[in-house]
Image: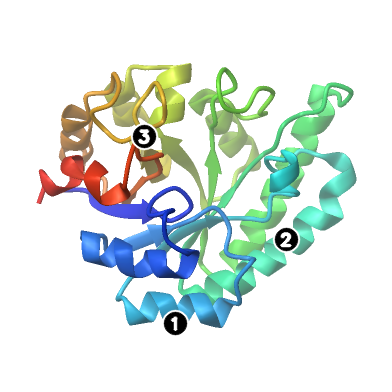
Amino acid sequence: MPRFAANLSMLFTDAGFLDRFERARVAGFSGVEYLFPYDHPAPELARALRDHGLTQVLFNLPAGDWDAGERGIACLPDRVTEFREGVEQALEYAQALGCRQLNCLAGVRPGDLDEDQAWVTLVDNVRYAADRLAEWDLTLCLEAINSRVDMPGFLLDSSGRVMTLIDEVARDNVRLQYDLYHMQIMEGDLIRSLECLLPWIGHIQFADNPGRHQPGTGEINFSKVFDAIDRLGYDGWVSAEYRPTGRTEESLDWFRGRG
């Protein structure tokens, strides 16, 4: 059975953020992730993890003004200083929370930014982040996000684009964050892709498609996919990052059925 984690930015959202840790543990999760920790003091989050016996699996580097629609700044030449300051902030939180992996969101390329310039900026920033994380023996993940439905213009919108970046960055601690929902939209053929990409995958997330809801609401055969993840010997975390159609606990049949 894969090691499942709960994304607290999407699950248990009928409760206050700090109350979601207990809800996740009671539901049977042993790991949690969320988009960003920065609105809460690190000691407060560390206490919530400790009180409920949870592992902090992942969170994102600062990604600009999320509420204003920014989805990462790593590709933006005029935000390099901000990006690198964000790496330092993320490292402080990672150390306080015992988190071994951080995710970098490349960002949406503005229409007036040359694609080659965006790419060069992204490569330089990822190398910087990877080198800083390596000093603490941490892994940097890079996520491909679909540009058809959720994030038009996102610079890394396929596993192939991420793999090209990983090859160019040439750092041993950089991995692919493989999101089943996004890659079903962009590529399909999920099990074969997992088989091919497994050596470079550092983290897996999932939601069904269409709708980005819990397994069983869309077209993905999660029983087969989860079985393949086990068969392939993947030993990382698999995080539920979906929007429940009702109360989160009522959306967990996929989880209870694999106990």
Work out whether residue 73 can be spotted.
no
**Could you tell me how far apart the alpha carbons at marks 1 and 3 are, in whole angstroms?**
29 Å
Identify the residue at image location x=44%, y=48%. Answer: 10
Which mark is drawn over residue 5? none
**Could you tell me how far apart the alpha carbons at marks 2 and 1 are, in whole angstroms?**
23 Å
Residue under label 1? 47
| Badge 3 amino acid | Ala
Q: Of 134 and 140, which appears nearest the observer? A: 140
Q: Quadrant of residue 133?
A: bottom right
Q: Of 3 and 199, which appears nearest the observer? A: 3
From the viewer's perspective, is 104 left or right of 30?
right
Residue 259 position, x and y percent, is: 9, 51
Near mark 3 (Cα within 10 A), the count class, few <14, some 14-19 or many ≥20, is many
Residue under label 3? 207
Q: Is residue 87 above or below residue 249?
A: below
- Who comes first in sequence, dot 1 or dot 3? 1
The nearer-to-camera label among 2 and 1 is: 1
Identify the residue at image location x=16%, y=31%. Answer: 223
| Badge 2 amino acid | Gly
Q: Secondary structure at mark 2?
A: helix
Q: Are marks 1 and 3 in contact (CB under 8 Å)?
A: no
Residue under label 2? 86
Near mark 2 (Cα within 10 A), the count class, few <14, some 14-19 or many ≥20, is some
Q: Secondary structure at mark 3?
A: loop
From the viewer's perspective, is 108 left or right of 145?
right
